[in-house]
Structures are given as C-alpha cells and as structure tokens.
Image: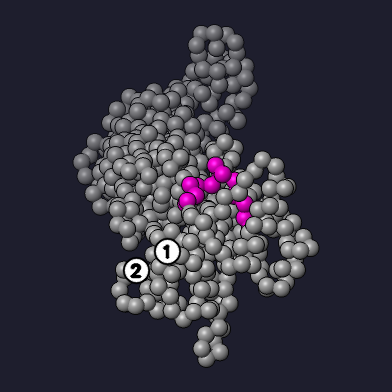
Amino acid sequence: MEPKFARRLLLECDTHVAAALATLVPFATTPGLQSSELLTRLEVVWQDTCAAMGTLCLLFLPLDRLYLRTPRAASFGGPISLWDSGVAIFRTRFCRLQEVKDVAVAGVLSLLDADRKGPPTDSDEVRAERRRLLGTLVSMLSKLDLYREPLEPLLLQHATKFFRRESEELMATASLVDYLVHAERRLEEEQCRCRALLQACTELELLVRVRTELLSVHCGPLLDKGFAHLVDNHWLADLERLYRLFAEVNELPAVRRAWGQAIRKAGGSIMKASDNPEESRNVMPALIRWRGRLGEVLSRSFQGSSDFGLTLKDALEELLNAGNLNRSAKLLAQRVDEVMHGVGVQSDAALEELAVGIIGVFRCLSAKDAFEAFYKKDLAKRLLCPDRKSCTLEAESIMVQKLRDECGAGFTSRIEGMLRDVDNASIHTSTFVGQHGIKATLNESKIDFHVTVLTSGLWPSLPATSELRYPVVAGKLQESFALSYAAQHKGRSLQWCHSLGHCSLRASFEGASRKELFVSHLQAVVLLLFNSKDTMTCGEIGATTGIATADLYRTLQSLSLHKTTKLLLKEPKRREVE
C-alpha cells in the first residue's frame, strides 16, 4: 500500500509542477514580452513548489522515513527524501522547457548587468527588490544543479564582455586616477556581489577575469597615461592604489620599469642645471629633496619593496654618474659645506634629516674618492676659518659618522684625524699659554694666542709659503711655541703655514672710529707696518715682511682693491701692483 501511494503522490507532484511551468511558456516564446515578467512568475512557481513540498514533507513524514529513506531505495539510485524527489521533478520538467530555461538564464545575466550598472534613477526599493529576485533565482538554479552548468560559464563570459566593453570606454575618457578609483570600486562591488548572490566557487574565477579586463589588458597604456605625473606630484594615496591593484595581477615588473623611467626623466631635468655655473648650486639641494620624496613614495606607496628600492638606486646611479664623474661629487661636497655653515640655525633633528638626505645621494655616487677630496678641502676651510661660530665639531662629527657607517672606518680615518687635530688645538694652546713667562708676555702685549697643529698627510695639500717676519712680540711667541712643542713631542718638527693663519686686529681710524678686522697673517703683517708710516712702496713692504712676490701682490690687491672696503690706498689706481 505504501509504495503504491508514494508513486501516486510523486505523480501528482509531477503533474502539478508540469502545469505550473507550462504557464511560463508564452512568456518565453511570444515576441515583445519582457523577460522580467517570466522571471517574476518563475520565482512564484518555484516558491509555491517549495512551499507545497514542505507541507507534503510534514504531512507524509512517516512515508518519507519508512519508504523513501530506506537503504533499499537508495541502493537502486532512487531519491532519499520526499523533498529531493520534488526538486528532481522540478528540474526534469524545467529542463524539458528549453525556451523557458534559456530565457531564465538570460534573465539572471540581465539582472546581474542591471545590478552592476545601477541606474541612478533606481530607488533603494527597486535595487533591493532586484537583488532579492536575483538571489532567489540563483538559489533555485543551485538547488536544481543548474548553477555549474549552464549558468556559471555563461555568467563568466558575460562578465568578461561587460568589463571589457566598460574598460575600453573608460580608457578613452578617464584619467589614470579616475580609472584606478573606478577599477578598485568595481572589484570591491563584484566581490560583495559574489558573496551575497553567487556561489563561493564563482568568486575566484570571476575576480580574475575582472582584474584581467580592467587592469592586465590595459597595463601599459595606463602607466603611460599618467604614472610619471603621479610620481612628480607626490600623490601617495593614488600610487599606493596603483601598486596594490597591479600587484594583484602580477604586473609589478611593468610598474617598476615605469618607475625607473619617471625617475630618470625628472632627475635628468634637475641635473641639466649642473652645466650652468649660476644654477649648479641649486642642483644638489633639489636632487636631495627629490630623492627624499621618492623615498617616501617607496616606503608609503610601494610598501618598502626591495625591488622598487633597487630600481630607485640604479636610476639615481645612472643620473649621478653620467658624463663628468667629478661634477656630481663636487656638487654634493658643496651641499655638505652649505649645510655645515648653516648648522647654527638648524635643530638636531633637522641636521639629522639633512645628513640622511646627503648620504642617500652619496650612496649612489661612484666617484667617492673625488667626493672625499672635495669634502676634505671644504672641511679644512671650515675648521681653520677665523670665525667658526657657524661650524661646530659636533655637527661635523655627525656627518663623518654617517660617512663611516656607509663606507667604513678606512674611508673616514683621515677626516677623523683632521677633527682630532682641531680638537687637540685647545690642549696645545692652553699648555703653552699656561707657562709663567708666556702668560706674562701675553698679558703685557694684549695678544690672544692660538695655534692649530695639523698632522701632515691628513689634511689636503698645504700651500708652501716663504718665511714671514712677524712683529717682535709675535715672532718671539712663535719661536717659544716651536721650542715647547719640540720638547713635548720628540722626533716631530713644525713647519709654519703662514697663509692659513688668521687673526683679529683692533684698528682705530680718524674720527674715533674703532673697527675689528678679521684678516690673514699676511694681511695683518702688512697692515701693522702702517702704524709707523703713512706710505710705503711695494718693494719696501716686501723687504720688511719677507713675503714672496706673488703672495705680496695678492695681499696688497686684497687690501687696496676690494669693492666695498679698502684698507689701503694705492697709487696709481689700477689693478697691477708695481
């Protein structure tokens, strides 16, 4: 009795489903009718069938357990539940109506398109109703085992065509930034749509196709469209978006090439000014600032990628080492000199930042030996300057430590020796002036005495100068220091470099005008002669001071031909000294 009743029950279900689905045929075969009407009616038929099968399962629960769910029924390949029997009946009848099935699948694709396009005239209620209907139909096809075939392949093909057409339209009108924003939004929407409406198996393949059509296919044209502009204008957020999106499609090698090209183009524009003597001093500050901005792009937008960092280093090396290698080394040494002269107005943090920027460029410089030579020459001038208020040993030590960290102790050993010489100068001077006889002489003559002993071989080539005849007191102090130093340091000898010496003279002029003059030793010795005489010839000055002729000419020209301050008056008034 029970098997016979079960067959009759399933037959009635089949008859009911066939009749219900037959009502959809006119909507699938009649031209002019909207597919949306068929989809709405199909939803109703499906929901009615599900409701009816649910009621039958409750009413005939014993039949379901005793007959349909028996091992014997399952062994013959029969359905294992009344609900599954109803779904199988619906699937069989639905698949026999090929026109209805085709229109239903096409309708689902149309609903997906409408959900993607999102017409602005649609209200929230319309969008919600469309998504509800779409979700119901996709769920129906999944339960009917019609999702993987035929829906999913058609869905993927349809999405590919949709985004291919959309990307081509955008490439013709949108800027790079707008395109990337749109692509990012599309990917986020498609991912949410997959998780809300489609099966999980579709998400991975669908997103791959969307990325391919929006990004991979147009990678080259997109980078040509404005990547260099983003780098030049420091648009970090947009560069981060570009890096992240192209990383998802394995197109970072192309981005790296565009990154290198942008660096070479912008850097080449900066380095062009190095050929102009008037503008060359601005080259290295601009290059260091620009390199700092690129470093920020690398760390914040490109996630500190080592590959992109290597591209940055290679591009900078190409820029700095093209043409005359000494040119870049000299410009960088000049920048260090400018920074060290202005250190008095810099905070420690600002000095550290400047030093890091300089080292960043120095790292890419191949002519490091040439830089060392220029650097030592400028350092010597700073350390031996008569007014070292703008230059401190602490600041110099910070810069030297950075160079040491970069190149090792061998590179900075001589530079550190120069700093030690200047630091030891106060020890040598205090030891000498502390002697009883010397202190009395200094107090009586009102002379401030200071000596810097330079270690031969550490400092740049020192100019050879002839003997200089100092005034009596100054000459005796010079001799006394030489004897004292020789007594303290056996085996060492001193050679005086008069041209490097500087001193401060207090001068009184007519009208009770008092001035303090910072001059070289050669200038000071010449000026002191005019305390006893008003006029002297060039020959007389040379014979009295012992200054070599070439040095004497330069000294007299500096004192008498200065544009604004002329300490001596010369006759005749022309540049030549006779």
Relative to 391, 86 lies left or right: left
The crowd level at tag 1 (other Cα within 10 Å; few <14, some 14-19, many 20+) is: many
Residue 255: x and y, percent?
A: 37, 39
114 is higher (above) or lower (below) than 562: above
Q: Secondary structure at mark 2?
A: loop
Looking at the image, the residue that sits furthest to the right is 436
537 is higher (above) or lower (below) than 167: below
The answer to if 563 sits in the magenta stretch is no
Looking at the image, the residue that sits furthest to the bottom is 511
In contact (CB < 8 Å): disc 1 and disc 2: yes
Res 146 → quadrant: top left
Distance (Cα) linking label 1 and label 2 = 9 Å
Res 384 → quadrant: bottom right
The crowd level at tag 2 (other Cα within 10 Å; few <14, some 14-19, many 20+) is: some
Residue at 33 percent of width and 61 percent of height: 278
Disc tally is 2
Q: Main secondary structure of the magenta part?
A: loop
Query: To which residue does mark 2 refer?
Result: 577
**Magenta span:** 451-464
What amino acid is at disc 2? Val
What amino acid is at disc 1? Leu
Res 20 → quadrant: top left
Residue at 59 percent of width and 26 percent of height: 60
| Viewer-proximal residue among 504 and 576 | 576
Q: Determine which of the numbered discs, if any, sits on residue 552 in the image.
A: 1
Residue at 45 percent of width and 48 percent of height: 374
